[in-house]
Image (cartoon, rainbow, N blue to C red):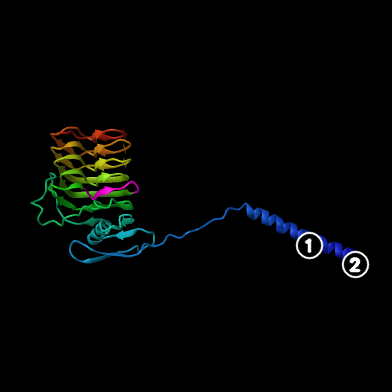
Amino acid sequence: KGAFMKNKTNRTLRKILSIALCLALVMSYVPMVSITASAAATDITVTIDTGASVTLRDADGDDYYDIGTADELYAFAAAINVGKYDINSELTADIVVNENVLTETGELNGDGSDFRVWPRTGYSFYYSGSFNGQNHTVSGLYFNDSSASAIGFFSCVNKAGTVQNVGVIDSYFNGNGTIGGVVGRNHGTLENCYSDTTVSGDHQSIGGVVGANDNGGTVRNCHSVGNVKTTASYVGGVVGYNKTDCTVENCSNTGTVNNDGFYAGGVVGRNYDTVTDCYYLSGCA
């Protein structure tokens, strides 16, 4: 009986050890899963054009600063221009900066002296974050300086930067060159954006959505219904100048392109690479 109990105990121990070994082998093949929560972006307080201090906050903790007012939009621009060029932001509402910037025919309404001026956002520090308009609009942007270049809602977007899901409407951009209704110079990705603006310039690379698309930039699913009015060269209803290794795809223009210079087009003014699935429904006068 003693021997029987001893053998039974040994079998039980071996069984337990076998189960433990099997579990260890199984667990060795189960991949480790690391779950990292998205950290909320730290508040940023900047001084805007009016002299007021405005704080950008990430209310929902998704690492995107929330923009719901014109002052917050100017705070976003100010943050980029002092070196916070890689911050992410999202619109939480339609933004109106100025009202009735354009007449019904797309001309500047008055001399512009009563309008709040939009800064060159991302001019010194190319924007390299992610901006998501969440299908909202930015209305009433105004910039008018014939000596300035790289003009638009964003002046310049870097290769890592993305601008998406936003409409820029009732806005006026005039400068020297590289001017677009959404982005002046694009090295990154611009998609699902539209422009109902008037853009003009004296030099080159003027477009309804993007002035110059270069350094591997992509413009995708974008549309313009505004006016491009200039005597410059490289002028397009969507993109003024699409350079080597750059792509314009699935874009359209139903606005007007008025140009007496060289290389004007309903979609792209001058193209050195890929333009696919694009169209325009208005003439070039």
Residue 144 left/right relative to 281: left
Give 280 or 44, whichever is nearer the viewer.
Answer: 44
The answer to which of 5 and 51 lies nearer the viewer is 51
**Magenta span contains residue 171:** no
Q: Residue at x 60, y 53 (%)?
A: 30
Furthest-right residue in view? Answer: 1
Instruction: Specify the quadrant of the image occupied by residue 221.
Output: top left
168 or 88, which is in the foreground? 88
Does 244 sit left or right of 5 as displayed? Answer: left
Disc 1 target residue: 13
> Split into 4 quadrants, where in the image is the N terminus?
bottom right
Callout 1, which amino acid? Leu
Q: Position of residue 279 (x, y in %)?
A: 27, 34
Q: Residue 241 sits in which quadrant?
A: top left
- Residue 155: percent from the left, percent from the top? 23, 49
**The residue stretch that appears in magenta:** 151-160
Q: Within the magenta stretch, is there residue 156? A: yes
Name the residue that disc number 2 marks: 2
